[in-house]
Image (spheres, coloured by chain):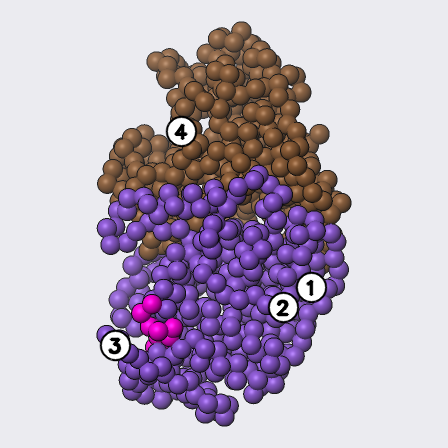
Chain colours: A purple, B brown
């Protein structure tokens, strides 16, 4: 089975929003000691696996989901890790996701396949589909697989990393609930529709782009609101009137939507809008799943998500020899460039995650540092489900 | 042979820079009457074909190049049309492009191919490669073709339109000379590295995204400079110090580079940087051509360009039935959305080009309206090459 390694991507911010939407508890502000925040990776996996098993998810599926979520936290993408567990549990409880389902092939050709995810866990559908894409790339040069009836599948790069393990180029993408408003419009149509593209360098190093096609994540707006500070840009969110706002409360509670990558029209936001639409075509329209405004709102757990996803693998051996050498050479060159910001070097897509993983392993004894909100919320979930809560590590000499 | 139709894409601006760099004549300000600006499409094609033939380009290659350039002007992308002819001529004169060369297959598999462009015309390499991609998509589901030793190939959408003619999804991309500076860096590394993605709708309508991965084109900065107005955004260009500038003269003459799509780091410019790098991996690194800073500067005609390009075709019949219907439905929905700008409707990628073509056909009797600069420059070229200059149309009742 595919295991997380040392390959990394572009930062995405960490909304605690989904967890809060689930819990919405008064007890969320319970005092948590600093020492209680550090949970070892293995312990977090144990906890997440147990919660899923208690809800009727088979051990193998529970394991894959737990590893997938842990990987996000390990890489610093807290929005897509433990933070999402409660949503997965809720979708199973409400009958809107079938934790037992396994995907199947609807149709296929030498280099393509259409998959029925059967409303199973996104990670199960995604791993099945990317494995098939890799197999087809081995046989035909390219594997291009679209899946329908899927669910949230975690970080996109989980699947492009699978392609990297075979030395292949990988692309993965998913559509998501409407949040992003097309240029000139006043209503969200597309999700943040992320896409990951990964290509191997040398010695485990690699290029891993993993980006939403929106300007920023909702989490960035939430952070400004909590700090009671204006948004630092007019390229993030639209206000009530459909025009850019910097008021964080308006942007969070009364927004006409997130802006696409680029922001306003003068900054070519229509390119981000076009990219988000292209992702939905590759994922939703090509697979025959829900798409655009037909996808359920992200707070709605009354219907199945029926997401569409796309997985591509390309055998680099079929192209010019030495691709990983050139990728490595280019990455080395970029990292050695003079930076305008003496405190922060020039990076390549994947480097922020490398730094996050180094912090976990080198400075935190293999433990993820969660927030007090995370810990409080998941103590409550443990209680509700009758699962042992996560135990923090015994820390030595940690400042 | 592939012929231009009624499919359209996102706007790119129109630098007159390349033409000016070639001519740099005092006579560029010669007075041109309004009536002299309207050149019928057929006449423009005749002129461009003749100029190429005079320089030793075979009739068939000259025809393809002329149609390719005309298509850009027809769609309102004047930067990539007649405006580029002088550059093609110069590259042939200097021996840095071989107008006679025809491409060949270096290696191939069921769904992939690597092409040697042999330093031929970009349009010849591109059409050859996209045809092969489409053929492979018919046989294997996907065709993924990379070409090296190529030259400037015009607008990306020329090739994705070829895929549309077969009802396929098309993707095309090229690397270009360094102009865009990675996030935090002070020196351009990547070109504007455009990418087109096209998918058919119904009755000739289609989604055609065609976008550079930079925030804006150089031409937009040039326009502000001529108007002596500041740049309207801090997301366009870096000043001498590597920080965003709004001074158009600094941005044009002493810039540390264009900013990637998104602009500054706070607006996720690292996503545009990552996309531009991904394009160079797909085009330059996978094909074994020049890439990143190794590509000649765009004013340098002392060496061959040796560009890398990528062409992908996907047979939509291999996925869920009814894709064009859903594409059409989504486009119709988007176009009918309420706009924040009552004068300008919500559009989908391709609509600005539709409007430009309608203007040519409905309001200008099939004539492209060039600028006085264009006309003056190309009168001079006609004289230099001994080719009949372009004759304007006899206009009826044009305001």
Q: Are marks 3 and 4 in contact (CB under 8 Å)?
A: no
Provide the secondary structure element on which disc 4 rests.
loop
* Residue mark closest to the camera, 1 vs 3: 3
Cβ atoms under marks 1 and 2 closer than 8 Å? yes
The first of marks 1 and 2 along the sequence is: 1
Report whether mark 1 lies on the same chain as mark 3.
yes
- The residue where tag 2 is placed is A125
The residue indicated by pointer 1 is: A115
Marked residue chain, label 3: A
Badge 2 and badge 3 in a common chain: yes
Name the quadrant containing residue B128. Answer: top right
The answer to whether residue B34 is seen in the rendering is no
Q: What's the magenta region?
A: A362-371
Kindly report the distance in space between the C-alpha atoms of the residues bearing marks 4 and 1: 46 Å
The mark found on residue A62 in the picture is none
Q: Nearer the viewer, residue B366 or A20?
A: A20
Q: Residue at x 71, y 68 (%)?
A: A104
Q: Is residue A164 left or right of residue B14?
A: right
**Residue A240 image position (x, y, % from top left):** 39, 65
* Side of B349 where A377 appears, left or right: left
Q: Is residue A369 magenta?
A: yes
Seen in the picture, residue B183 relative to A43 is either above or below; the reply is above
């Amino acid at each position: 089975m595919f295991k997380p390694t040392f390959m990394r991507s572009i930062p995405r911010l960490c909304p605690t929003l989904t967890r809060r939407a689930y819990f919405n508890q008064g007890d969320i502000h319970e005092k948590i000691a600093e020492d209680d925040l550090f949970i070892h990776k293995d312990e977090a996996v144990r906890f997440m696996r147990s919660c899923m098993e208690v809800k009727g998810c088979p051990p193998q599926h529970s394991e894959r989901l737990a590893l997938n979520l842990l990987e996000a936290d390990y890489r610093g993408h807290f929005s897509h890790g433990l933070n999402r567990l409660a949503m997965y549990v809720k979708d199973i409880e409400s009958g809107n996701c079938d934790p037992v389902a396994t995907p199947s092939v609807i149709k296929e050709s030498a280099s393509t396949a259409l998959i029925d995810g059967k409303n199973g866990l996104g990670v199960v559908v995604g791993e099945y589909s990317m494995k098939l894409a890799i197999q087809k790339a081995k046989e035909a040069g390219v594997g291009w697989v679209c899946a329908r009836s899927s669910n949230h599948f975690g970080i996109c790069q989980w699947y492009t990393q699978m392609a990297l393990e075979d030395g292949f180029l990988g692309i993965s993408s998913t559509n998501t609930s409407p949040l992003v408003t097309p240029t000139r419009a006043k209503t969200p149509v597309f999700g943040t529709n992320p896409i990951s593209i990964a290509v191997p360098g040398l010695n485990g190093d690699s290029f891993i782009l993993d980006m939403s096609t929106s300007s920023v994540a909702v989490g960035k707006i939430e952070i400004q609101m909590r700090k009671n500070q204006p948004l630092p840009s007019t390229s993030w969110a639209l206000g009530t009137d459909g025009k850019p706002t910097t008021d964080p409360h308006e942007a969070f509670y009364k927004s006409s939507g997130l802006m696409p990558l680029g922001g306003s029209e003068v900054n070519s936001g229509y390119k981000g809008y076009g990219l988000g639409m292209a992702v939905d075509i590759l994922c939703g329209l090509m697979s025959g799943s829900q798409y655009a405004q037909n996808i359920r709102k992200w707070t709605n757990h009354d219907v199945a998500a029926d997401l569409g996803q796309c997985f591509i693998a390309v055998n680099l051996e079929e192209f010019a020899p030495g691709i990983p050498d050139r990728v490595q050479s280019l990455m080395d060159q970029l990292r050695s460039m003079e930076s305008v910001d003496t405190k922060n070097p020039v990076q390549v897509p994947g480097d922020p995650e490398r730094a996050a993983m180094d912090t976990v392993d080198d400075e935190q004894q293999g433990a993820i540092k969660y927030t007090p909100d995370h810990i409080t919320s998941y103590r409550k979930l443990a209680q509700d489900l009758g699962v042992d809560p996560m135990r923090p590590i015994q820390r030595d000499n940690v400042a």
